[in-house]
Image (cartoon, rainbow, N blue to C red):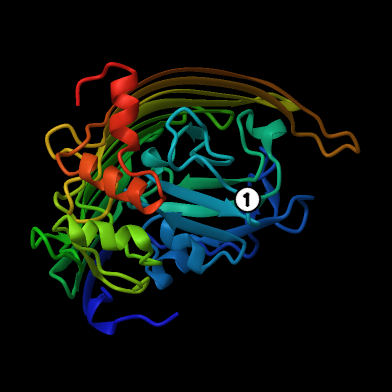
Amino acid sequence: MPMNKRHIPFAAAALAMSVNFQAHAVLEEVVVTATKRQQTLQEIPIAVSVVTAEAIEQSQVLDIKDLQTLVPSLRVTQLQGSAQTNFIIRGFGNGANNPGIEPSVGVFVDGVYRSRVGSALADLPKVERIEVLRGPQSTLFGKNASAGVINVVTAKPDLVGYSGSVGVTLGNYNQTIIRGDVTGPLSDNFAFSLFGSVNERDGYFDNLTTGTEFNELNRWNFRGQLLWAPSDRAEARLIIDAEDIDEVCCGVANLVDGPTGAIVRALGGDVVGNAPFAYENYQDFDPKNVIETNGASLHIEYDFDNFALTSITAFRTLDQFLSCDVDFTSSRLVSADIYDERNTEIDTFTQELRLTSTSDGPLQWMVGAFYFDEEVKNDENFGLGPEFRSYVDVLLAGLGAPGALGAIEAFLALQT
């Protein structure tokens, strides 16, 4: 794929500082929870790829979109807006452009279901590992996951000692990434952890009409945890997180400059034609992408003699404001006052209860229940611009039906 090197953002320089007050043991084997119980990667009968925290740090993976560089079966496509993103596993994935459809690749962060892609786009917090499960997983995960699951497991607060890190990355297009975390005990059985990050970068796709640069980055997130372990058998963890994205995204290039391109130019508009790899185009107004999501979850685990009880209670909200010049030209075909816009509000409550056997006998079992309640509010507005009527008249004339629109309006007694 040819690319214009002038427009490729990259990290030109990086400065990282970490402060560690405790040495951590290195695990000799990879332990995963893909089957909702702790097992080694060799023991589970599921096709799963595991990406460790060390691999994520070394590869500079910032979010789930970057994860596709480490997991060959995962592909991420981003369409005309930040939230219009598809996670695709083995060629299957959906849900980018319809807020009423849950994606077929389920995203879980610490066991909590993220019901829309917009709530899973922020930069990753400090993670322990990420598991990408291939194939249908609805039986164990309780939600629509017909194509697979991306299971993000974050690092728990440290009950033994204090540690923390600060990282600063600088790149071209004025990119600045600041990340920091700290964790440590508050008492013998009580610990905390805090994480925060800011990621900003100028755009690199030029809107030749307004002079705005699309595909910028402007996002921050925060995650706080409290861990209480009153005994060797019991553990409770409270997690609160907030994430915000406010970006001008995304640039759309022209694949084929067909007959309608000539109509657009005849009306005084323009489009960069036949240039699928161009980093510029004409649009008469700029898109908006504002995504705000936050939530809280309570995790309770208790080990009995032969089985373990797990409870995960979570509440999440997702607010999205998205707008786009959907004709992707500088002609005023879509109204700049009542343009294509979408306001989406999603409130989600989930409750998972699970009993899992812990004995070493030949029979291993698991029973559980998953409750899901979601309220979706979606308002969409669409207005036609002042040049749309002329556009349709010319288009119909080219199809051999001049004046057809006026005739239909007269027949229906509509005002022209």
- Quadrant of the rendering where the N terminus is positioned: bottom left
Q: Where does residue 353 sit, x and y in percent of width and height?
A: 61, 20
Q: Up-down: is 119 above or below 59?
A: above
The single residue placed furthest to the left in the displayed view is 211
Q: Is residue 215 left or right of residue 78?
A: left
At 23% across and 75% down in the image, what residue appears?
14
Regarding residue 318, the answer to whether it shows in the image is no
Q: 310 or 106: which is nearer to us?
A: 106
Which residue was labeled with disc 1? 92
At 12% across and 34% down in the image, what residue appears?
337
User: Looking at the picture, which amino acid does disc 1 mark?
Assistant: Phe
Q: Count neighbours of disc 1 (C-alpha within 10 A) and say few if under 14, some if 14 to 19, many if 20 or more.
A: some
Regarding residue 171, the answer to whether it shows in the image is yes
- Quadrant of the rendering where the C terminus is positioned: top left
Q: 190 or 176: which is nearer to us?
A: 176
Q: Where does residue 47 sit, x and y in percent of width and height?
A: 72, 55
Q: 125 or 165: which is nearer to us?
A: 125
Q: Is residue 317 left or right of residue 50?
A: left
Q: Where does residue 329 sit, x and y in percent of width and height?
A: 23, 56
Quarter of the image where one finds residue 202: bottom left
Q: Is residue 112 left or right of residue 196?
A: right
At 35% across and 72% down in the image, what residue appears?
274
Q: 127 or 189: which is nearer to us?
A: 127
Please, what secondary structure does the residue beneath circle 1 have?
loop
Q: Where does residue 111 sit, x and y in percent of width and height?
A: 53, 35
